[in-house]
Image (cartoon, rainbow, N blue to C red):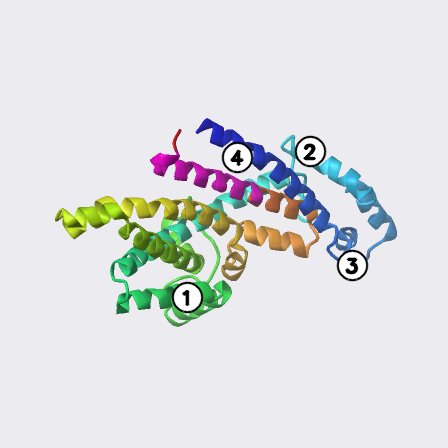
Amino acid sequence: MMGLLWRRLAVAVPTLFLVSILVFSLQKLLPGDPALALAGEERSPEVIEYLREKYRFNDPVPVQYAHWFGSLIQGDFGTSIRTRLPIGRMLLEKLPVTIELAVLSMLVAVLLGMPIGIMAALKRGTAIDYGASVLGLAGLSIPNFWLGIMLILLFSVNLGWLPAGGYVPPSESLWLNIKSMIMPSLVLGTGTAAILMRHARSAMLGSLRQDYIRTARAKGVKERVIVLRHALPNALIPVVTLGTLQFGELLAGAVLTEQVFGIPGFGKMIVDGVFSRDYAVVQAVVLCTAAIFILMSLLADIAYVLLNPRLRG
């Protein structure tokens, strides 16, 4: 286990370093001058030059990267040129919101995808199986923003059951927080539910074809015991590891959902940073998201080893 951790960390550190280089370099390809955006409507030449000197926009790109990376490894993400707030504080404020959305979305995905996928495998070739395939294809095909708008029209505009957007912290009102997160969680969780459903079905079918399942049936073991005690635990191994990776993708892929519902998380933060040419914010969010995804990949590897005794050594 420790050997696996060290090998994964040996890959993770250079990966993060390369991601930081790519993020910083690609940011420079974006059109527009952040100094002009900060200067306001008058755009005085003196103010523009002052801003370029203050934020090192005149320095060569390698020098800018070295200064940014040097501050980064000391825990200083810089200051937002739009809000004038420390980016580290902004990350700490926005990250819990996106994590809450990702957790609730994963809960929706598990509660929908896993039972449907397992039932489709047990009822292979029946109407239930074909219906599950149709639902899975629909979940993968329907765009998040369209589904979000449709849910808003139904549950907010027509029925008035749920708020159309916004976010209420749990510390202020747990009930309002849950109401504000129901539709975003459904939107973000349906695609992941479709992925989990398809993999759960495939894994369950593969497990049911194994020799030990045929042996158990030949011995007269009840079908319920075969499914719950023998087939299901082995089928869950790849699905659990996939779910861990999918959780990382939920954190990274909540941009459109947060924009549609006005949720102040990582997605909205990065969109605001792009439109305002706030390069430091965009770099910090992308790098933080990449670090979380690498961490989830590491957890997926660990979960696979823990769940599969044959890989322990």
Residue 196: x and y in percent read 38, 54
- The answer to whether residue 172 is visible is no
Labels 4 & 3 near each other (Cβ < 8 A): no
Q: Write down the residue under mark 1.
A: 137
Among the 4 quarters of the image, the one containing residue 283: top right
Labels 2 & 3 near each other (Cβ < 8 A): no
Q: Which residues are magenta?
A: 290-311
Residue neighbourhood size for the residue with mark 1, other residues' Cα within 10 Å, grouped as few (<14), some (14–19), many (≥20): some
Q: Write down the residue under mark 2.
A: 71
Quick one: SS at disc 2?
Answer: helix
Which residue type carries mark 2? Ser
Residue 295: say if magenta.
yes
Which residue type carries mark 1? Leu
| C-alpha distance separating marks 4 and 1 | 34 Å
| C-alpha distance separating marks 3 and 1 | 49 Å
**Quadrant in the picture for the N terminus:** top left
Residue 164: x and y in percent read 45, 63
Residue at 40% in and 51% down: 106
| C-alpha distance separating marks 1 and 2 | 46 Å
Q: Write down the residue under mark 3.
A: 41
